[in-house]
Amino acid sequence: MTIKTILTEPNKILRQISKPVENVGKEEQVLMKDMLETMYHAKGIGLAAIQVGVPKRIIVLDISKEENKKSPMFFVNPVIKNKNLKLSTYEEGCLSVPNQFAEIDRPSECIVEYLDFNGEKKILKTKGLLATCIQHEMDHLEGILFIDYLSKLKKSMIIKKLSKQKDKVDRIVV
Ligand code: GNR
Ligand code: NI
């Protein structure tokens, strides 16, 4: 398994729309395992393939709290079938928007149809953090980041901060 580099904003690749997977084969399974390892390493609870530069509609999640009770979930070609009209608010973060957090409203429950790790069709009813996280990850598949829901001012302040941070890192590396 391989820990991959997580792309961070600003990066145009993160704005790509990911393509449906035609067949869940060996290549996709290796990618899912690498994504999971990358996510655990970065201490995240979810990761979309585009965050490691692969524009495929693949998501991995693990919202379990305890380190010794890992429960990874894999979603290929996920589709939201039903969204609750009721919204809930969570303080969201994103591995592609490091160290920035904001409260975001999203439907509190949703039903997701997807293919699992073995390519089998599944339907899952989600609520709470799982529902929020799935929707956050599905936004990545459309090139959307949580900062896109903030005011123009807040969003531009965050992007400016991240750009400066990147420049600094580049200067040290070069
Ligand atoms: O690690 C993550 N935590 C998180 C917290 C609240 C709402 C969404 C998330 S997802 C995020 C990992 C990530 O960036 N996934 O794309
Ligand atoms: Ni994210």
Image: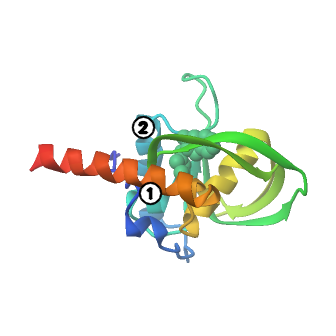
Q: How many marks?
A: 2
> Residue 146: image x %, image y %?
59, 54
Residue lying at 47% horizontally and 73% vertically, measured from the top left: 16
Amino acid type shown at disc 2: Ala
Residue 75 in view (yes/no): no
Mark 2 within 8 Å of ligand 1, using the beta carbon = yes
Residue 157 in view (yes/no): yes
- The residue carrying pointer 1 sits among few (fewer than 14), some (14 to 19) or many (20 or more) residues within 10 Å by Cα, namely many
- The residue carrying pointer 2 sits among few (fewer than 14), some (14 to 19) or many (20 or more) residues within 10 Å by Cα, namely some
Up-down relation of residue 157 to residue 79 (above or below): above
Q: Which mark is residue 42?
A: 2
First in residue order: circle 1 vs circle 2: 2
Q: Which mark is residue 51?
A: 1
Residue lying at 63% horizontally and 26% vertically, measured from the top left: 65
SS for dot 2: loop
> Residue 91: image x %, image y %?
66, 38
Mark 1 within 8 Å of ligand 1, using the beta carbon = yes
> Residue 106: image x %, image y %?
76, 52
Is the Cβ of the residue at disc 1 closer than 8 Å to that at disc 2?
Answer: no
SS for dot 1: helix
Amino acid type shown at disc 1: Gln
Looking at the rendering, the quadrant in which ligand 1 lies is top right
